[in-house]
Image (spheres, rainbow, N blue to C red):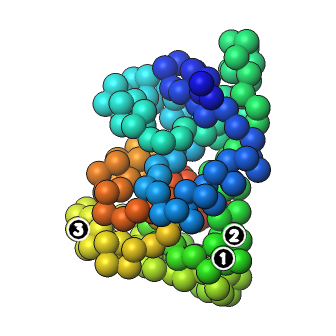
Amino acid sequence: TRTVDILGIPFFNTTETDFQEILHNKINDHTNTFVVTANPEIVMYAKANPRYAELIQSADYIIPDGIGIIMGAKMLKTPLQERVTGYDLFVHLLEWGNAHQKSAFFIGAQPAVIRKLKKAVQENYPFLTIAGTHDGYFGDDRNIVRDIKRTKPDMVFVATGYPKQEEFINKNRSTADALWIGIGGSFDVLTG
Ligand code: UDP
């Protein structure tokens, strides 16, 4: 098996470049894929919330986002190869998506941040189709989900922080055969 268990969370043991390639293949094949980028806070939150733990265990990949996870694995004598952050994956997928003319849907952050993100993507990744954008402060997700279903994006980036982003993905991933990935505060970082 390719996973390393940290406090009950099975982390996928990979390197950044290997994992990028896995995701390229999943996206090209339109395989429905759910990726959790988990830091120590997420592991602790899962430990205290069994329902959240169960939810993230249904993901296809849980990736070690944070040096604390790498150190923990080493201390447990079951080392993980490399840290793979949600933010780095996000930036890589924007570049790759631009080079391969993919489409992406962006959900998360404050309205002003998501507006800024949309502009930045249009300017820097002109061949990446923006299937849709929505800020992360919504009650009802029905309109967002309807738009995802209609636009059939290759990638859905959900940056609403945990546990909201994983709950959203778990609930809605069946509406599009896309890569669904939760990436925390990445929209703020990219536009900041
Ligand atoms: N956020 C959001 N909706 C919410 C709560 C938070 O879109 O209901 C956004 C917030 O604006 C920020 C990100 O989610 O852009 C959270 O970033 P953080 O680095 O705290 O992520 P976490 O470590 O909580 O996953």
Nearer the observer: mark 2 or 3; the answer is: 2
Q: Are marks 1 and 2 in contact (CB under 8 Å)?
A: yes
Q: Quadrant of residue 6?
A: top right
State which tag comes first along the sequence, 2 or 3. Answer: 2
Cβ of mark 3 under 8 A from ligand 1: no
Estimate the x, y position of residue 147 in percent, counting from the top left: 32, 76
- Disc 3 crowd rating (10 Å Cα; few below 14, some 14-19, many 20+) is few
Q: Which residue occupies 41% across, 47% down?
A: 166
Amino acid under label 2?
Trp
Nearer the observer: mark 1 or 2; the answer is: 1
Cβ of mark 1 under 8 A from ligand 1: no
Considering the numbered disc 3 on the image, is that residue within a helix, a strand or a loop? helix
Q: In the image shown, does 99 or 26 lie closer to the viewer?
A: 26
Amino acid under label 1?
His
Estimate the x, y position of residue 65 in percent, counting from the top left: 65, 41
**Residue assigned mark 3:** 142
Q: Quadrant of residue 1?
A: top right
State which tag comes first along the sequence, 1 or 3. Answer: 1
**With respect to residue 50, does 130 lie above or below?**
below
Distance from disc 1 to disc 3, alpha carbons, whole Å, reads 30 Å
Distance from disc 2 to disc 3, alpha carbons, whole Å, reads 29 Å
Estimate the x, y position of residue 5 in percent, counting from the top left: 57, 21
**Residue assigned mark 1:** 100
Q: Are marks 1 and 3 in contact (CB under 8 Å)?
A: no
- Disc 2 crowd rating (10 Å Cα; few below 14, some 14-19, many 20+) is some
| Residue at the extreme front of the image, as rendered | 29
Tell me if 18 is positioned left or right of 136 in this view: right
Q: In the image shown, does 121 or 150 lie closer to the viewer?
A: 150
Nearer the observer: mark 1 or 3; the answer is: 1
